[in-house]
Image (tube, coloured by chain):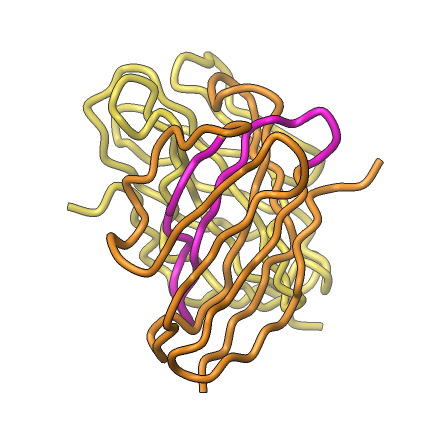
Chain colours: A yellow, B orange
């Protein structure tokens, strides 16, 4: 079974609008962390936001927020007021703290976001 | 304060040759991770190293691939007798401590290997 599922291969959003990128995860560990990274066309991986499984509040970092629904095992990324520079591939990733994968991140297949002028 | 430095950024090899990819972690980081990204896919974990130790190599192919992180110098990912299927982007990441809590991996820009 996929540990991280990103069901949207591609998304389009109008500049200045908000967009939600979906991410669902699968783990039996009670303690885990969820991450979003951005990969622009230049190829580097840029950290955006982190959510811990025990965090009571949804994480926010500037225009990025994470809609964490623990019971649904979803960790959707919300980008408000989209900018042309937001066009990139976005990856959701998970760290499981008690299983053998505590030492690494497991990534989803990514969502290609295109912001339209 | 330089980030994670990877070189070369682009490497072209013919089938059967060797590829060596280098990674210098961020200053103060002693934990290094290598990931591989095949075209149109997400990153797949390969190996996790600390200085002079391989901690987790569960993602490394059993043959032709090896990694090291010596006491002095960069971490090296070595691929012997490359095949076309090895063509991918190889990312190095580092962290100051073992991955836990809000500890974030900082990635390099990647090394793109093309096997002809």
x%, y% of residue B31?
A: 55, 29
Percent position of residue A71, x then y? 26, 24
Residue B77 in the image, given as x and y percentages of width and height: 49, 53
The residue depicted at 63 percent of the width and 68 percent of the height is A41
Quarter of the image holding residue A47? top right
At a point 66% along the width and 66% down the height, the residue shown is B9
Classify the position of the C terminus of chain A by image quarter. bottom right
* Residue lying farthest to the left in this orientation: A1
B97 or A37: which is nearer to us?
A: B97
Is residue A79 inside the magenta stretch? no
| Magenta stretch bounds | B26-49
Residue A110 percent location from the top left of the image: 42, 57
For the residue pair A22 and B92, the one nearer the viewer reads as B92
From the viewer's side, name the closer residue of B13 and A83.
B13
The picture quadrant where one finds residue B103 is: top right
Is residue B35 on the magenta stretch? yes
Residue in the image at 28% along x and 17% along y: A98
Judging depth in this view, the residue of A79 and B29 nearest the camera is B29
């Amino acid at each position: 079974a996929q540990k991280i599922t990103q069901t949207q291969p591609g998304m389009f959003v109008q500049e200045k609008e908000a967009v939600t990128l979906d991410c669902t995860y699968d783990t039996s560990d009670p303690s885990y962390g969820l991450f979003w990274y951005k990969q622009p066309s230049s190829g580097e991986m840029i950290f955006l936001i982190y959510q811990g499984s025990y965090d009571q509040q949804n994480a926010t970092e500037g225009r990025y927020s994470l809609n964490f629904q623990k019971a649904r095992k979803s960790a959707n990324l919300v980008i408000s007021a989209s900018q042309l520079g937001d066009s990139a591939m976005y990856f959701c990733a998970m760290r499981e703290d008690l299983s053998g994968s505590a030492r690494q991140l497991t990534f989803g297949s990514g969502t290609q976001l295109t912001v339209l002028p | 304060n330089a980030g994670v430095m990877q070189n070369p950024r682009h490497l072209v090899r013919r089938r059967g040759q060797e590829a060596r990819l280098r990674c210098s972690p961020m200053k103060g980081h002693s934990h290094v991770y290598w990931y591989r990204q095949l075209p149109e896919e997400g990153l797949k974990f390969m190996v996790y190293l600390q200085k002079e130790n391989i901690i987790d190599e569960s993602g490394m192919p059993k043959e032709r691939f090896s990694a090291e992180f010596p006491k002095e110098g960069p971490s090296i990912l070595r691929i012997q007798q490359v095949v076309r299927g090895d063509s991918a982007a190889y990312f190095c990441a580092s962290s100051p401590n073992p991955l836990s809590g809000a500890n974030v991996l900082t990635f390099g820009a990647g090394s793109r290997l093309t096997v002809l």
